[in-house]
Image (tube, rainbow, N blue to C red):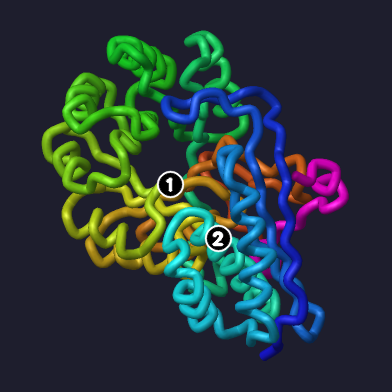
Amino acid sequence: MAKLTSIEPGFYRIPLPEALSDSTHGEIRAFELNTIRLRDADGAEGVGYTFTVGRNGAAIDAILTREMRDIFADAEADHIESLWQKAWWALHYGGRGGPTVLAISAFDIALWDLKAKRAGLPLWNFLGGFDPKVPCYAGGIDLDLPLEKLLRQTDGNLAKGFRAIKMKVGRKRLAEDAERVKAMRAHLGDGFPLMADANMKWTVDEAIRAARALQPYDLTWIEEPTIPDDPAGHARIVREGGLPVAAGENLRTLWEFKQYIASGAVTYPEPDVTNCGGVTQFMKIAHLAEAFNMPVTSHGAHDVTVHLLAACPNRSYLEAHGFGLDLYIAEPLRIEEGCAIAPNRPGHGIVFDWKSLEKIRA
């Protein structure tokens, strides 16, 4: 065991190569990245991170800088479950969700990275090791792309090795969504895994109507059809819409996932390791889904999450997210014949280009 001797937060604004768009966030030109670097008494380093859609990164940075340094001063780095509980309850009254959970998530990821490195194992193996080849889809943030450009983007993703695609829906007219999904189905062919993401756009009744309209196109799932605060509404959509439902990227706790899973409000639970409480909580959510005989998928942070799904026998698809870090890390996610390959480097294996990031410090 070794005590933590250094806690170093970082806060950066990552420009996107081209503007992205969805039904609730509108046009997105950059995302914000919060990092945390931990060192223990032996000099070993663990790195964690979280991200936001261009806002609130400063709040996360403040929590990492002020609160985490105080809470974890001289802590035993190996006691991850104890440290998670300590942070949760220390910060609970002032924020049991939002930036607080994102900050805890980043710190927790760094602790697991450090512990796996000290064991000399890749994180996926350290967590139990199921299969390093994880089925993967390209997660397009493409609501406003003209159809021709959407199809060209799809061809580019196929050329990269993807064998499953997710597109955005939630345009002003349902008929436009249906036309675009129909065109994608025709372009990809029967049986090709195709998902559609509404980003919470609809009311429950609108979502049921949309799901029924999209039924003929054999979607793997419809994602986030309505707001995350309505598990009863999600359960109605699952029952009455006729399509599987993926949800969870905006849920922040294990207990929120319990409500969704136990009440039949989701078909594919979809935690994000950077905002659900880190590796500690992601794996609990995945195992909870397994106990209900349900597949688990993921949102965002694919460079970390590939390890987590590689340790889950009930994994379905890893999302290769549009907010990628490829320009700022040494070895981006590797895709082969539709699968993401969890690396065998110790820890999560993500090596940031800190000099390049320094140029875009927020």
Mark 1 or mark 2: whose residue is earlier in sequence = 2
The residue positioned 30% from the left and 34% from the top of the image is: 225
For disc 1, the marked residue is: 317
Residue 133 lies left or right of residue 113; in this view the side is left
**Image height of 102 relative to 112, above or below:** above
Q: Which mark is residue 307?
A: 2
Placement of the C terminus among the 4 image quadrants: top right
Q: Which mark is residue 305?
A: none
Q: Which residue is the extreme one toward the bottom?
A: 1
Residue 285 lies left or right of residue 14; in this view the side is left
Q: Nearer the viewer, residue 67 or 332?
A: 67
The answer to whether one can see residue 11 in this image is: yes
Q: Quadrant of residue 258?
A: bottom left
Residue 201, percent from left and from top: 34, 28
Q: Nearer the viewer, residue 280 or 118?
A: 280
Residue bounds of the magenta highlight: 345-362
Q: Nearer the viewer, residue 275 or 329?
A: 275
Placement of the N terminus among the 4 image quadrants: bottom right
Residue 351 included in the magenta stretch of the image: yes
Q: Which amino acid type is marked by label 2?
A: His
Residue 286 lies left or right of residue 156; in this view the side is left
The residue positioned 52% from the left and 9% from the top of the image is: 148
**Image height of 229 relative to 87, above or below:** above
